[in-house]
Image (tube, rainbow, N blue to C red):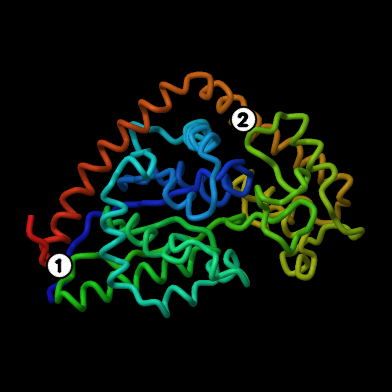
């Protein structure tokens, strides 16, 4: 096989399962916005098909989908520069996922950490969709011949499986049709932790609202949550090594670094030796300045849901223009008559 040349293209997505958090912003959306000005084509998706692998209230899902789209746009994603759409509007995602279901192996899927975590001891009652989730994720990415995918650490294993599926497809059909996608994992806060427990990821499903900053929180709420964030009694260190075994301190410093677009070392050079009683007001002011305008813009955008729908439909048409020829070529390779 000769090595194919692929147009550099970025793809990523977030589930509209409700409650966009600071973790989603710093770990994903902020990087999405930065990448749209890199000169590489960028495609960003509201992955609603993934969301329904666990139960979603059908009355709530449309609002959650629009709210996530509003969050993308409010954070700076430009629907003219990037393609923005929701996954279920482009049927080719599900069609390619079926091909990949026939390429992937049960053993690969059963080793996925996220499957084990979400299904737990109740695997017999978990949905087939949840088990096959990584195959659909592979289809999302490879449907656009995406060469790079910005992901958090928790999705790295799924990216590795995407690469395995591409390699096996190419090997089985003696082609080099699908690219071997590279994960993009970078930044100070690609994994934002709970404000109440630095050993746990910040999550919209945590029963304590104080554990997270929601992207819909107003300025006063953001400041209050940071002031009440769990810390330890020691002063901040002057070097990153001093954050070892201090998960809450490390988390707040990581958040400060990400919001200020600084490195951990740069932050600690400025705040090393300070008590949290001094540092927290600094972080609160920074967070309010960065996040409150996004929250306000999300609220404004949600007042015109028809405009959000228009943007998503337009993005879906642009996405389909890329996806359809790639799916049709896949069908040709597999031997489907059309």
CA distance separating discs 2 and 1: 47 Å
**28 sits to left or right of 296:** left
The relative height of residue 12 versus residue 313 in the rendered view (above or below) is: below
Residue 81, located in which quarter of the rendered image?
A: top left
**130 sits to left or right of 323:** right
Number of the label disc, if any, that sits on residue 198: none
Q: Which residue is drawn at 80% across and 65% down?
A: 246
Q: Do labels 2 and 1 touch, CB within 8 Å?
A: no
Number of labels in the image equals 2
- Residue matched to label 2: 295
Q: Residue at x 56, y 56 (%)?
A: 187
What kind of element bears circle 2? Answer: helix
Q: Position of residue 279 (x, y in %)?
A: 82, 46
- For the N terminus, the quadrant is bottom left
The relative height of residue 223 versus residue 200 in the rendered view (above or below) is: above
Residue farthest along the front direction in this orientation: 125
What kind of element bears circle 1? Answer: helix
- For the C terminus, the quadrant is bottom left
- Residue matched to label 1: 334
């Amino acid at each position: 096989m000769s090595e194919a040349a692929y147009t550099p293209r970025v793809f990523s997505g977030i589930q509209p399962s409700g409650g966009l958090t600071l973790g989603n912003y710093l770990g994903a959306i902020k990087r999405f916005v930065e990448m749209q000005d890199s000169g590489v084509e960028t495609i960003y998706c509201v992955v609603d098909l993934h969301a329904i692998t666990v139960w979603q209230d059908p009355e709530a899902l449309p609002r959650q989908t629009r709210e996530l789209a509003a969050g993308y746009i409010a954070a700076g994603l430009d629907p003219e520069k990037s393609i923005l759409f929701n996954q279920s509007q482009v049927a080719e995602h599900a069609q390619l996922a079926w091909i990949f279901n026939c390429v992937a192996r049960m053993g690969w899927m059963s080793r996925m950490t996220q499957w084990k975590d979400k299904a737990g001891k109740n695997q017999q009652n978990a949905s087939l969709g949840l088990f096959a989730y990584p195959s659909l994720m592979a289809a999302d990415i490879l449907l656009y011949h995406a060469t790079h995918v910005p992901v958090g650490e928790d999705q790295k294993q799924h990216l590795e499986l995407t690469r395995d599926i591409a390699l096996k497809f190419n090997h089985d059909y003696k082609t080099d049709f699908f690219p071997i996608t590279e994960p993009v994992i970078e930044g100070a806060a690609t994994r934002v932790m709970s404000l109440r427990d630095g050993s746990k990821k910040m999550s919209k499903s945590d029963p304590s609202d104080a554990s997270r900053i929601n992207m819909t929180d107003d300025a006063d709420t953001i400041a209050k949550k940071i002031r009440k964030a769990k810390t330890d009694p020691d002063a901040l260190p002057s070097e990153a090594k001093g954050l070892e075994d201090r998960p809450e301190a490390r988390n707040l410093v990581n958040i400060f670094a990400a919001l200020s677009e600084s490195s951990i070392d740069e932050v600690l050079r400025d705040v090393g030796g300070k008590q949290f009683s001094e540092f927290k007001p600094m972080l609160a002011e920074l967070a309010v300045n960065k996040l409150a305008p996004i929250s306000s813009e999300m609220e404004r955008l949600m007042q015109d849901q028809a405009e959000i729908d228009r943007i998503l439909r337009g993005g879906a048409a642009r996405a389909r223009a890329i996806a359809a020829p790639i799916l049709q070529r896949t069908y040709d390779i597999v031997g489907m008559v059309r």
